[in-house]
Image (spheres, rainbow, N blue to C red):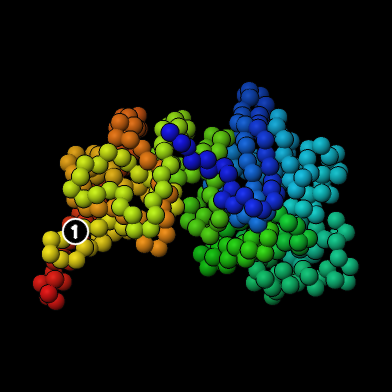
Amino acid sequence: MANRNQLQPASSGEKNMIEMHQVVKTFVNAAGEFTALRGIDLTLKKGEFVALIGKSGSGKSTLLNMLTGIDHPTSGEVVVDDVDVYAMSESKRSLWRGRNMGIVFQFFQLLPMLNLLENVMLPMDYVGMYNIDERPKRAMELLRMVGLEGQAQKLPRAVSTGQQQSAAIARALSTDAPILVADEPTGNLDSRSARHIIDLFAELSARGKTIVLVTHDPSMTERASRTMVISDGELVNPTIAQALPLLTHPLIKELNHRVETVHFQPGETIIHAKEPVETFFMIASGNVDVILHKRRKEDVTISQIGPNDFFGEIELLRGGKSIASVCASQDSPVELLALSREDFHWLMGESPLTEEAIGNIVQKRIEENKQADRRKKKRWKLFG
C-alpha cells in the first residue's frame, strides 16, 4: 500500500529554504538520557506557511531550536538557505540568525529595561541593519502593524501580556528576515488579536517569507499551507493524528504503514448507497457530501464532512449496507486515507479509547441523519 508522505511540501517548484536530515537531539542529566528528537527529516520550501502541532513534550520547541541554531543537535544536519547551520562558529551563527531568522519566543524575551520601541529596534542594532536614524521609524511602523503604536514608549511591564507578545512579533520582523519562527505566538492573545496575527503571517507568507508556527491549537492551522504533527520526537501523518487523536504514538506509526492514499474527482461517488462498506476513510484534503437518495424525489445532501474527519465507520461498526452515498463535493477533488475493514477492526481492538470515541460519533451521526431526514420530509409535506 502507498503511504501519504506528510513531510514533503505541497509544491516542488520553489527553492528549498530549510532542510533537516536525520536530526537527533538527546538530553543527558542526572536522571539519565532523554531523546527529544528521533531522526527528523524535513524539507520546507520558500514561502511556505507551516503549522507544527503536537502535545506538550512532543518535541516542538526542541525542533525549533534546531531550525534556528539556538541549540546543537546530537547528530544530523540542518541546512537553511544553503547554509550548514552547525558548520559555523557560535559567534557567526548568532550573527547569521539575527539576519535570517525572525524568532517569536513563547515567553516574549523582551528586555525589561527597554521600552517597546527600543526592544523592536534591538535586532537592527545588533546586526547593523538600516541607518541609525531610520531604525526608530521602521520600529514604529512595525508596532503600528501589530496595533501598538500608542504603547511604543512604555516598558514591557507596563503593558499586558498580549501586548508584550505583539511587541515580540514586531521585533521578530524588524530585520526583514526571510524566515519567521514562532513558538505559540497567539497563546497570550485574545481571539481578535490572534486572528490579526495569523492574518499577518498569511500575508507575509504570500510575500515570500517562510513561516513556521508552533501551536497547541489545531484551529490555528486553518490558514497554514501545510500542517505537520510531531509525536514523541517524530513527525507523523497529520491526517491520522488529527482524525484519531486518542491513538498512541506507536499506533499512529503502524497505521501510517497500513493506510492507502486514494483520490476522487469532484462529484465522484466514494461509497454507494445500499452496498456493503469495506473501507474506513480519513479525509486528508477536500470535502465529501453524504447524500440520501429518495425514490421519485430529488436527492438530499444531509451533511458535508471536511479534512481530518472520517466516514464509513457506521457500517463497519454496526454492519449492514450503507443507507446513503458519499461523494466528493462538486467544488474540488478529495484526497483520502483508506483503511481496510480488517485493519479497521484491528485498530479498534488495539485502541479501546478510539473505539469508544468513534462509537459515540456513530450514535451522534445516526441521530443527526434521522433529524435531517425528518426536516426534509416536513418541508416536502409543506411545499410539495
Report whether residue 223 is seen. yes
Q: Residue at coordinates 31% horizontally, 49% vertically from top-left?
A: 270
Estimate the x, y position of residue 322 in percent, counting from the top left.
21, 47
Q: Tell whether 42 sits left or right of 370.
A: right
Q: Circle 1 is placed at which residue position? A: 293
Q: Tell whether 220 sits left or right of 364.
A: right
Structural crowding at the residue carrying mark 1, measured as other residues with C-alpha within 10 Å and reported as few (<14), some (14–19) or many (≥20): some
Estimate the x, y position of residue 375 in percent, counting from the top left.
17, 66
Quadrant in which the N terminus is drawn: top left
Measured along the vertical axis of the image, is residue 376 above or below residue 66? below
Measured along the vertical axis of the image, is residue 340 above or below residue 45? above
Nearest the viewer among 378 and 269 is 269
Estimate the x, y position of residue 119 in percent, counting from the top left.
77, 61
Q: Tell whether 186 sits left or right of 336.
A: right
Estimate the x, y position of residue 189 in percent, counting from the top left.
56, 62
Secondary structure type for disc 1 = loop
